[in-house]
Image (cartoon, helix red, strand yellow):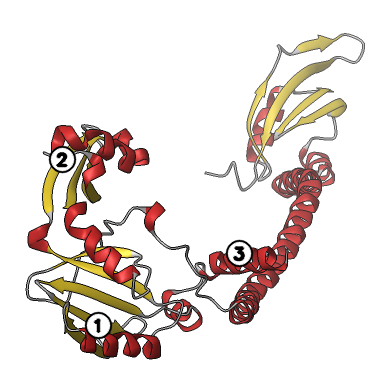
């Protein structure tokens, strides 16, 4: 039970580690050593690589029939490797058949199974006679095609090598393809998954746990100011919304105030533009003859209408025209005779002179 819990935690922490940047992940993840084994004719060559290094730190070689050198090499293996060392059997490229294929794009999800079904149709061999793998070259989404390269090696060539390596005893995990005259090999694994040894967890759970805690703290340090700024922004937004609502409530009052101010200004201007009635009465009292009296006076805007009686009504027009306060005097109706008083009844109008009517 504890072993299962340990494996689960290791798997879970490994997944979390993938969230870290590559440089940090490499510090915390333990990269296993690699041991490459290559048979060239009757000569075995073994090379040991540490971690991510592309240069071997040690190497050994021996002929198949040299029992003494073989024993020395196996002793060397016991001293330099651990249980996590990845054993890679390297196959010369000239022993590998390659073929370019075009398959439907939908086949990518079951690519290995489909290649197994297509093996005897695409190659001279049946699937049980070969080890194989593939590399996707391109995905043509327009034509829904998948372009790939198929790599095949005969089991008759590889199985004796695997049997020899397993007798040392080592468990190969990868069958790789070597480039000619180089130590590099393609990222291809011809060994089927069912023939590979179970993967050992290469990550120390305690180290991963500390790394995850450190990552969480780092994220908290980075995110906390953003959360705080977001809270401040929300608070300011709330204040702005409240101010906006208050402004909406005040807007009708502001408009009403503006209307009142406009009316008051209009009345003020109107009063300022008109001559006071007392001045009009004073002017009429001063200029009209003593035999003339008024029984009605109407003031509308800048016009004054006079109703009254006089001994000589026609002379009143000239009197008003001579005044500095009136102009454009004229009768509004014919002059009639009042038989009771023997005076002329008149109805006339005149215009008040102010700053707006002066010419």
Question: Is residue 246 shown above or below 123?
Answer: below
Looking at the rendered structure, the secondary structure element under dot 1 is strand
Question: Residue 256: horizontal and vertical position, in percent?
Answer: 79, 43
**242 and 65: which is toward the camera:** 65
Going 18% across and 50% down the picture, which residue do you hit? 152
Q: Quadrant of residue 162?
A: bottom left
Instruction: Tell me which numbered mark, 2 or 1, is placed earlier along the sequence.
Output: 1
Distance between the alpha carbons at the discs numbered 3 and 2: 42 Å
Q: Quadrant of the N terminus?
A: bottom right
How dense is the environment of label 1, judged by Cα within 10 Å: few (below 14), some, or many (20 and up)? some
Of badges 2 and 1, nearer the viewer stands 2
How dense is the environment of label 2, judged by Cα within 10 Å: few (below 14), some, or many (20 and up)? few
Of badges 3 and 2, nearer the viewer stands 2
21 relative to 130 in the view: left or right = right
**98 and 159: which is toward the camera:** 159
Question: Is residue 49 shown above or below 347?
Answer: below
- On residue 125, the disc is 2
Query: Which residue does the numbered mark 1 point to in the structure image?
Result: 47
Q: Is residue 248 visible?
A: yes
Going 13% across and 56% down the picture, which residue do you hit? 96
Looking at the rendered structure, the secondary structure element under dot 3 is helix
């Amino acid at each position: 039970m504890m072993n299962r819990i340990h494996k689960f935690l290791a798997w879970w922490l490994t997944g979390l580690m993938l969230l870290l940047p590559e440089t940090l992940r490499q510090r915390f993840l333990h990269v296993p050593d690699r041991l490459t084994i290559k048979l060239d004719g009757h000569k075995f060559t073994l090379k040991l690589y540490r971690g991510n290094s592309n240069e071997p730190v040690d190497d050994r070689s021996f002929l198949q029939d040299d029992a003494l050198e073989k024993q020395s090499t196996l002793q060397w293996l016991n001293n330099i490797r651990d249980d996590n060392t990845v054993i890679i059997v390297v196959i010369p490229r000239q022993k590998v058949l390659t073929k370019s294929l075009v398959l439907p794009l939908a086949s990518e999800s079951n690519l290995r199974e489909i290649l197994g079904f297509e093996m005897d149709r695409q190659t001279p061999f049946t699937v049980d006679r070969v080890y194989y793998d593939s590399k996707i070259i391109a995905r043509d989404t327009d034509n829904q095609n998948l372009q790939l390269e198929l790599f095949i090696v005969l089991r008759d060539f590889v199985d004796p090598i695997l049997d020899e390596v397993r007798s040392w005893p080592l468990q190969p995990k990868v069958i790789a393809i070597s480039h000619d005259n180089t130590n590099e090999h393609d990222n291809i694994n011809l060994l089927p998954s069912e023939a590979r040894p179970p993967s050992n967890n290469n990550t120390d759970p305690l180290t991963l746990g500390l790394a995850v805690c450190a990552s969480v703290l780092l994220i908290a340090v980075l995110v906390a100011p953003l959360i705080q700024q977001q809270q401040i922004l929300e608070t300011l937004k709330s204040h702005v919304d409240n101010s906006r609502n208050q402004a909406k409530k005040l807007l009708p009052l502001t408009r009403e105030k503006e209307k009142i101010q406009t009316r008051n200004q209009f009345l003020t201007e109107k009063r300022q533009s008109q001559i006071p009635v007392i001045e009009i009465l004073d002017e009429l009292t001063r200029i009209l003859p003593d035999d003339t009296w008024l029984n009605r006076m109407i003031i509308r805007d800048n016009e004054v209408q006079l109703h009254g009686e006089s001994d000589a009504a026609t002379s009143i027009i000239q009197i008003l025209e001579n005044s500095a306060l009136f102009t454009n005097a004229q009768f509004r109706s014919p002059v009639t005779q009042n038989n009771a008083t023997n005076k002329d009844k008149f109805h006339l109008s005149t215009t008040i002179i102010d700053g707006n009517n002066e010419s």
